[in-house]
Image (cartoon, rainbow, N blue to C red):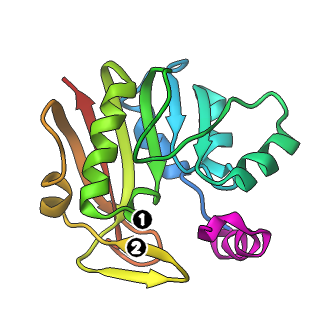
Amino acid sequence: MGFFDTEENIEQYLKMAEGYDGKELIKVLKTYLKRGSSVLELGMGPGKDLDILRRTYKAAGSDNAQLFLDRYKKKHAQADLLLLDAVTMETKRKFDCIYSNKVLQHLTKRKLKSSITNQMKVLKKKGLLFHSLWYGTGEEHYEGLTFLYHTANSFVSVLPEGLELLEWKRYKEFKADDSFYAILRKK
């Protein structure tokens, strides 16, 4: 059983994430991706970023935790949601962009490389990947969750062939430069 498979842990996560969303990240995405494009959010959690993405894009949300999908569906019956593993990316659908906000840091380097390789199969030609992660080195473990930190070099080292790095930038989530986002285009 995973961390996000119990109501208690979901509630704990919601309290921790209160007041945070990807509004600023999505502003950056808008400079690269035209209105009306299809976007898949990986690891949508409670759906804060999905709400923002849906205002501009044909956005679908995904999570590997059915509880998050069920909660979101109760409030947004027409929402396009997928139960999806971020590593295997088992869907036949194709998207103009795949977006995640602090999701992929839960993957080991090997799984991260597999995830991005499989994300490329779900992207349309010239599609974008937009991912934010924690900046730093090392890893932490909390109640069964892994948090793997990345630098520019460690992140780029897991990227498969066929991607062009458009932008990589550090930003503040809790404190100066504790996070970064990367925007990549499928060649």
Camera-side residue: 46 or 143? 143
Please provide percent x and percent y for residue 56.
Answer: 59, 27
Task: Give the amino acid at mark 1.
Answer: His
Camera-side residue: 49 or 83? 83
Q: Give the residue at x 31% y 55%.
A: 111
Please provide percent x and percent y for residue 36.
Answer: 55, 18
Give the extent of the magenta segment: 1-18
Q: Residues within 10 Å of mark 2 (few under 14, many from 20)?
A: many
Label annotation for residue 24: none
- Name the side, left or right, on which 164 lies relative to 87: left
Q: Secondary structure at mark 1?
A: helix
Label annotation for residue 147: 2
Please provide percent x and percent y for residue 180.
Answer: 32, 60
Q: Secondary structure at mark 2?
A: strand
* Cα distance between the residues tagged 2 and 1: 5 Å
- The residue identified by callout 1 is 106
Camera-side residue: 133 or 25? 133
Asked if residue 17 is among those painted magenta in the image, a careful observer would answer: yes
Quarter of the image for the C terminus: give it.
top left
Task: Give the amino acid at mark 2.
Answer: Phe
Query: Disc 2 or 1, which lies upstream in sequence?
Result: 1
Magenta residues, dominant SS class: helix
Asked if residue 167 is among those painted magenta in the image, a careful observer would answer: no
Q: Give the residue at x 79% y 68%.
A: 7
